[in-house]
Image: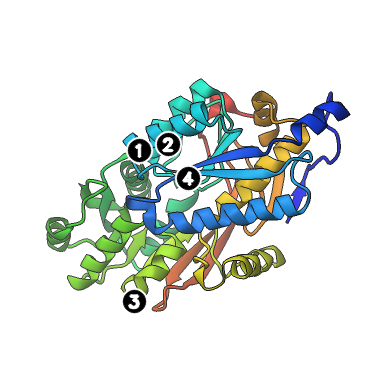
Amino acid sequence: MKISSLILGLGAGMTLGAVAHAAEDPIVIGVPIGLSGANSVVAPSVVQSAELAVEEINAAGGVLGRQLELSVADDGSGAQGAQRAFDTLVFQQEVDAIISMETSAARNAGLPIVNRGQVPYIYTSFYEGKSCSPWMYANGWVPQQQVAPIVDQFMKEDGANSFFLVGSDYAFGRGMLEFSRQYIEANGGTVVGEEYLPMDGSDWTPIISRLRSADADALITSTAGGAPNVTLTKQLRAAGIDLPYGNLAVDEGTAASMGADAEGMYIAASYVTGIDTPANKTFLEAIKAKFGDAAETANDLSVPQYEAIYAYAAAVEQAGSTEPEAVIEALGTVTVDGPRGAITMDKQRHTPLTMYLGRVAADGSVEVIESFPNVDPGEQCPQLAN
């Protein structure tokens, strides 16, 4: 792993005595995550990638001579659990930073706690966009980067004009589909149906019935990551639905867990395991070496977690301390060359990304159809522009 802008040695204003004192204690990174609930399908892969990053950084000497340490807390994939998890990490454990993939409901519940505690927070999930805080950076994709490849594929290659939208009833599901509706209509298409189910819902039968009656040309879904993706897709296949199907919320690991049910599904992602670069090959080999047969499929939620820990380490090195304001200032300037390529969170606390349009094969792997380099995240947090 190569980290640009990584400054080694003593930071500005750091004395030898201060470094020696600091080295006695680890730098603790809090990871609130859905070990239970909707995200429980993908959470293990995210935790594994975090553990690998910490192990690698510590083996290379740590950060400012101190070791990194993880503190993982189950947020239950929802708001109530997130409030407990964030409160424990920020105010009881007094972690140095929060770095994690979470549902938008969990993020929205935890962010006020981050703001009160003034703790650097790197949000590593793809999401609906426009979540802004002086204490938060995001390194996953937003709708401006992810929706167009799928909709354009259906319109230009499949001749689709009418779309049916299905989502989980919370910020991510509604936010993604609102952007999708706007993009579809701006490009001459129509939305003939839009339906939602609660995050913990599992019976999609009435919605599938309305989908069948709508006579749409294509289907686009945006559900909570993990379990809802699995239940919806299985029920769509069981009902014989064979429309062009774009899933805005599925990651490669979840697709792999679906097996043949996911075959033919289109996704747009900033990471796929087939990225043919030395950095990605090294990462995949390291995951396999560390976890063996228990290794989870690397995906568009776990890889940003891995890269974010490296970004935090680089920011601390550049700042010369873990002092929150100094780290926040540095986070927008450091670059991590990781499995996805060069990642810099310098666009209103977000990052340009290479996006991959892919189609899921029968074994759950993703065949890349087209790539789109350096896609800008657009207007997200203009008040926080770097």
Expressed as whole percent of the image width and height from the top left, the position of residue 70 reads 58, 45
Expressed as whole percent of the image width and height from the top left, the position of residue 12 reads 84, 27
- Distance from disc 2 to disc 1, alpha carbons, whole Å, reads 6 Å
Q: Residue at x 59, y 35 (%)?
A: 97
Mark number, residue 135: none
| For discs 3 and 4, the disc positioned in front in the rendered view | 3
In the drawing, does residue 226 fall left or right of residue 45?
left
**SS of the residue under disc 2:** helix
Q: Are the residues at dot 2 and dot 3 in contact (C-beta closer than 8 Å)?
A: no
The amino acid on which the numbered mark 3 sits, given as a three-letter code, is: Ala
Q: Which residue is mark 2?
A: 85
The amino acid on which the numbered mark 4 sits, given as a three-letter code, is: Val
Q: Are the residues at dot 2 and dot 1 in contact (C-beta closer than 8 Å)?
A: yes
Mark number, residue 260: 3
| For discs 3 and 1, the disc positioned in front in the rendered view | 1
Mark 4 and mark 2 lie on one chain; the one further toward the N terminus is 2
Expressed as whole percent of the image width and height from the top left, the position of residue 195 reads 20, 49
* The N terminus - image quarter: bottom right
Q: Which residue is mark 4?
A: 142
In the drawing, does residue 109 fall left or right of residue 203?
right
Using the image as rendered, state which of residue 168 and residue 321 is in the foreground: 321
| For discs 2 and 3, the disc positioned in front in the rendered view | 2
- Distance from disc 1 to disc 4, alpha carbons, whole Å, reads 24 Å
Expressed as whole percent of the image width and height from the top left, the position of residue 256 reads 42, 70
Using the image as rendered, state which of residue 279 and residue 247 is in the foreground: 279
Q: Which residue is mark 1?
A: 81
**SS of the residue under disc 1:** helix
- Distance from disc 4 to disc 2, alpha carbons, whole Å, reads 25 Å
